[in-house]
Amino acid sequence: MDRIFGGIEAGGTKFVCVIASGPNKIYAEERFPTTTPQETIQKAVAFFNAYQKNNNIKLSALGVGSFGPLDPNPTSKTFGFITSTPKPGWKNSDLLGPLKSNLNIPIAFDTDVNAAAIGEGLWGAAKGLDNFMYFTIGTGVGGGAIINGKPLHGLLHPEMGHIRLKHDLNFDPFEGNCPYHGDCFEGLVAGPALQKRFGQPAYNLPIDHPGWDLVAHYIALAMSDFICSFSPQRIILGGGVMQQTQLFPLIHEKTIQYLNGYVQSPVILENIHKYIVPPKLGNQAGMLGSIAMAMQLF
Amino acid sequence: MDRIFGGIEAGGTKFVCVIASGPNKIYAEERFPTTTPQETIQKAVAFFNAYQKNNNIKLSALGVGSFGPLDPNPTSKTFGFITSTPKPGWKNSDLLGPLKSNLNIPIAFDTDVNAAAIGEGLWGAAKGLDNFMYFTIGTGVGGGAIINGKPLHGLLHPEMGHIRLKHDLNFDPFEGNCPYHGDCFEGLVAGPALQKRFGQPAYNLPIDHPGWDLVAHYIALAMSDFICSFSPQRIILGGGVMQQTQLFPLIHEKTIQYLNGYVQSPVILENIHKYIVPPKLGNQAGMLGSIAMAMQLF
């Protein structure tokens, strides 16, 4: 019989809990809103314990891919804590601790974007690659990098949505929407920034609206920067904004234009449409990523 | 007796060849201009062979930190080649091959900035760290990253000098100097860009010239971007422009300002002067880095 794993996609808006043996073997799933840490964690624990009891099985491990900022350093006193989030009740709160003490199984803990990257690397659009990046462009913008086969953490963990992009205010006077940085990547292209810029939710815009060209412009500038910084073998773009699939060809064309021939690789120059791609696991990338983390830990 | 290693800091302007057992045990050094590949490589080979013969010793290994773009992938057919450089005679030229066939010792091959990073990690400003970055800001701008203890290569290798920075043309109408990207990091702060902007070599400017504030502004914007992208434990800034040590306090202050409290780590917030630092190996970072590479290979 297959080993059975648990996963939590711990988002700032909702938690997705899942029990699975792989991407095509999902046995149970539950979603609930992210309220207080105590209530939310208790619901997750109850879900996993009920499944184990009712099916008379023991989960082999759990993976948690969480919103942040968080502490992913296993040697730190606050390993597994959500740290400086503005989300009420969650600042400096212990997410991993109560899961550990209530479930008594090995738990892997990382950022939501690293989890999605790990899942895409095991089963999805980056299968077989050792160096790639995963971005979510939705309510916020976040990025995870797998380098030499391992997720990048560094000092804390990256905050890739907060790099500042080239932004000519004469060409585009929109000042951005990030409370910390104004016109950073997230401040220019996350959902709330688009809502502010267009005066309506971006998904209401027709697919041939010229606004998409501007959105693709900034995403392509970010892609060009990340290609120069990380030299990834592939970049995966997920999240709600990227559901607008008309963005992909625009991003492809502009990324090539902005790199301007400087990075001489046929992987980019001749195959950009296979280089910047949507997640193969679609909107399951997060929850399957948490299962992938659990499997890798086990 | 100590093992003896060879190193080459292969620059676009000059080659530095060195024989050493460590940073304080340098036995011989030779510098010569980078002319044709054949002549330059032949001079390097002659230097190492003469030393081995005259001293009746055998080098244990050689490290080569080279200008680029280059191919650092050991499984590639063109491993050890300089690839798309505009430098006359060097495009698609084999640097590693003739060294190997003439010296018959193990050779480690990487970018000049990765070499310097490896040296600073072993003996210098990043001793004991697993995740850090080294930048040279001089004739050009390049960056290397050590991640989880290993140099980052990815698809080819990073070209960190070519990220585009936030640049408000109203505030600063200078269009930059990079033939590929105009106002990228290198196009705004490398030596030739400063020469173009100020109409004279930057080292002629007095240290209280307001231009340094502008230079620090862009370097700090880049630091802020790289901190958000990589979350390094430390950043080392070397190269000719950074010999202007008055830049460091300006860069420290502005980096904190541009991050604006988003990355909550005392390592950055309380100790920025220990976080963005000059190389401890000074202008020997490159050549000692090549020795460090040879030692690691051995």
Image: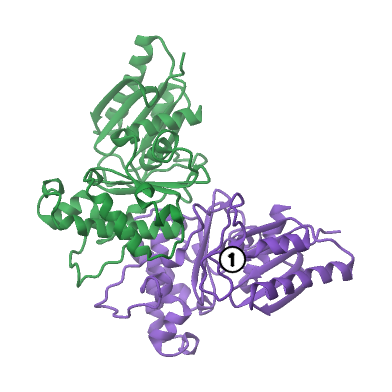
Chain colours: A green, B purple
Chain under numbered label 1: B
B279 w.r.t. A235: above or below: below
Q: Nearer the viewer, residue B246 or B153?
A: B153
For badge 1, the amino acid type reads Asp
Residue at image position (60%, 64%) is B116
Residue at image position (16%, 57%) is A211
Residue B39 in view of the camera: yes
Residue at image position (21%, 46%) is A244
Task: Look at mark 1 in the image and give the residue it sits on.
Answer: B112
Which quadrant of the view contains residue A176? bottom left
A154 w.r.t. A88: above or below: below
Q: Measured from the top left, where is residue B245 in percent x and y?
A: 51, 77
Q: Measured from the top left, where is residue B138 in percent x and y?
A: 51, 76
Q: Measured from the top left, where is residue A61 in percent x and y?
A: 45, 24
Which quadrant of the view contains residue A24? top left
**In this picture, residue A186 sits left or right of residue B65:** left
B93 w.r.t. B173: above or below: above
Residue A144 in view of the camera: no
